[in-house]
Image (tube, grey):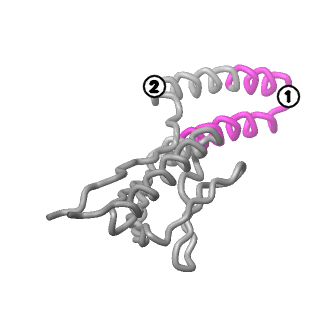
Amino acid sequence: MDAPVILNATLRPNPPMRARTLLWILMTVCAFNAAFALYFVLRGAWPVAPFMGADVGILAWAFFASRKAAERAEHITLTPGSLSIQRLAPKRPPEHETLNPYWARVDVQEWGPVVVRAQGRAVSLGAFLGPKDRESFGKTLAAALREAREYRAF
């Protein structure tokens, strides 16, 4: 008989705006920067123009990095016999850790991630979550770990 799954959670960062909205913002900024660059070039201050283009390039990179960062996830599965943590990130192999729930303790820090400590190891979870979400998940995980320790298979 398989052990029941006590907790099955997937943590993901809040996604940025839709790609279409980000593209609209980027095109608007590009149009304004092109207008200002043209104004400066016509006034003889042509060295300003490359910097106006660099602004748009940096903003495009920031939007792209934000969308890529939102693709990561942490999948937590708790049964009476194991606490399994799998981290998924774009362009990286998945990371997998397994802890014994009997020894696992949850430490919820106000300004840091949820830390699960067991057998001399510490695993951080939900570093990308907001403070209220981290606190809520930490309480849920602690309650689930208590339930896993009290589980009796008959």
Mark 2 surroundings: few (<14), some (14-19) or many (≥20) residues within 10 A: few
Which residue is farthest bottom? Answer: 120
Q: Position of residue 106 (x, y in %)?
A: 57, 60
Q: Whole-percent x and y of residue 91?
A: 41, 60
State the SS at label 2.
Answer: helix
Confirm whether the magenta stretch covers residue 43: yes
**How far apart in space, not on screen, are marks 1 and 2 (Cα)?**
36 Å
Image quadrant in which you'd find residue 60: top right
In the displayed structure, 115 sits above or below 26; it is: below
Q: Residue 75: tell me if it is visible.
A: yes
In the depicted view, which residue is nearer to us: 78 or 72? 78
- Residue 20 is marked as 2
- In the image, residue 45 sits, relative to residue 100, either above or below, namely above
Q: Quadrant of residue 62?
A: top right
Near-viewer residue (29 or 70): 70
Image disc number at residue 44: 1
Three-letter code, disc 1: Gly
Magenta span covers which residues? Answer: 34-63
Q: Quadrant of residue 30?
A: top right
Q: Is residue 57 above or below residue 81?
A: above
Query: Where is residue 27 shown, x and y percent of the image?
Result: 57, 24
Q: Is residue 110 above or below residue 153?
A: above
